[in-house]
Amino acid sequence: MKYKMYDEMMEQPEALQKTFESEFAKMDEVSQLVLDADKVYLIGCGSSISTCYSVRDAIRMSSTNIDIEVYAGYEFYYNKKLVENENAVAIFTSQSGETADTLAALRKANEYGIHTVSISNEPESSMIAEAQTPIITRGDTETAILGTKTYITQLACLYQILFKASDYENKTELLAELADMPKMLEKLLLLTEDDNKALAEKYADEDIFYCLGSGPNFGLAYKLAMTMLMEGAIKHACPEYAAEFRHGLIERAEKDVPVIILWSDFEADEITKKAIDFCENLEAKLILYKLEDYADVDKLLSPFILVIPLEWFVYYLAHFNGEDPGATRHIGKVRY
């Protein structure tokens, strides 16, 4: 049986290519704004904030010239340190463009005279209408809660904008690989389905997963736990920076407990290796996703690559538990 999410996953390469073609000039404009700004705010909720975490950590690992802060919507709205007319750029991410938290934050930034940029998938949304610089991701309306097309296109827009403005020494090569990402994703979607379907069937009866990643992989671990496993597969899940394994999780990791670790051989993954060794010695159910098994690209692009096999894993995990991976029980019904 195929769910709506299946079609939306397969449409990711096309959505990303269309976004590059239609929005590239605007992304260049925002890159220039970032170059001239003293600070960049990234604001989102749910899957969208995970893209903010990933690009923030990628920039911090590779570049020195961009000061980035990440906020959830209402955390930005209630931030008392905001300064009127400060030399800053605030970039807001939302699949629907109507996320109440993020929209409130955008309106606050507009009131404070901060240059606002919105990245959304809905051309007629409030965020697109109210931002000074709107960027429309070209994934058409997405219905599956996991956010596949919108995740990959949002993440690409953020990487394009911020790395174009960065002083990362390998940014030319990274941006070239980013431009080639639609082709890479197309191959990965075909090559990673069967293995992750089998993996999902193996772990279908598990009820909790711990998700770890370092650098930009933490943002993906956050998405994996918060919006993929909990919302999509209806499983308990907890995200954590891999280097924080020895705080908290080390006392919960036990024999046969599933631990998903995202590995890209970052400098910080020296500590991730210690978590891997500990899990293996404890005989935890270690599920290791390694960048080198899927693509030969700049390590900072790891979330683009690893999200594809993870999507298949969660898709089939939901399926084997009798759940529609794109459906929701409460999201959209609760407003505050």
Image (cartoon, rainbow, N blue to C red):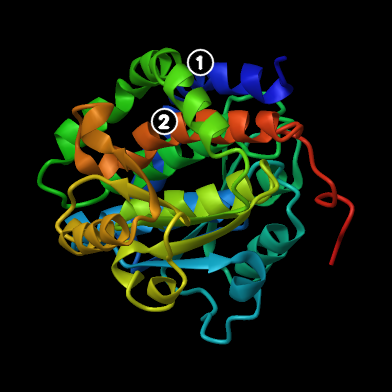
- Location of the C terminus (image quadrant): bottom right
Give the quadrant of residue 322: top right
Query: Mark 2: which secondary structure?
Result: helix
What separation in Å lies between label 2 and label 1 (alpha carbons)? 19 Å
Q: Which residue is mark 2?
A: 25
Say whether marks 2 and 1 touch (CB < 8 Å). Answer: no
- Quarter of the image for the N terminus: give it: top right
Q: Quadrant of residue 293?
A: top left
Residue at image position (34%, 72%) is 244
Amino acid identity at mark 1: Glu
Residue type pointed to by label 2: Ala
Residue at horizontal 71%, vertical 58%?
Answer: 103
Who comes first in sequence, dot 2 or dot 1? 1
Q: Can you see residue 95?
A: yes
Task: Please rate how many residues cluster around mark 1, counting C-alpha atoms within 10 Å: few if below 14, some from 14 to 19, many from 20.
Answer: some
Q: Position of residue 182 (x, y in %)?
A: 39, 19
Q: Is residue 298 shown left or right of residue 179? A: left
Residue 298 sits in which quadrant?
A: top left
Neighbor class of circle 2 (other Cα within 10 Å; few <14, some 14-19, many 20+) is few
The answer to whether 29 is drawn above or below residue 102 in the figure is: above
28, 290: nearer the viewer: 290
65 vs 70, left or right, is left
Marker disc for residue 14: 1
Give the residue displayed 58% in from the left and 49% down from the top. Answer: 47
Q: Toward the viewer: 78 or 293?
A: 293
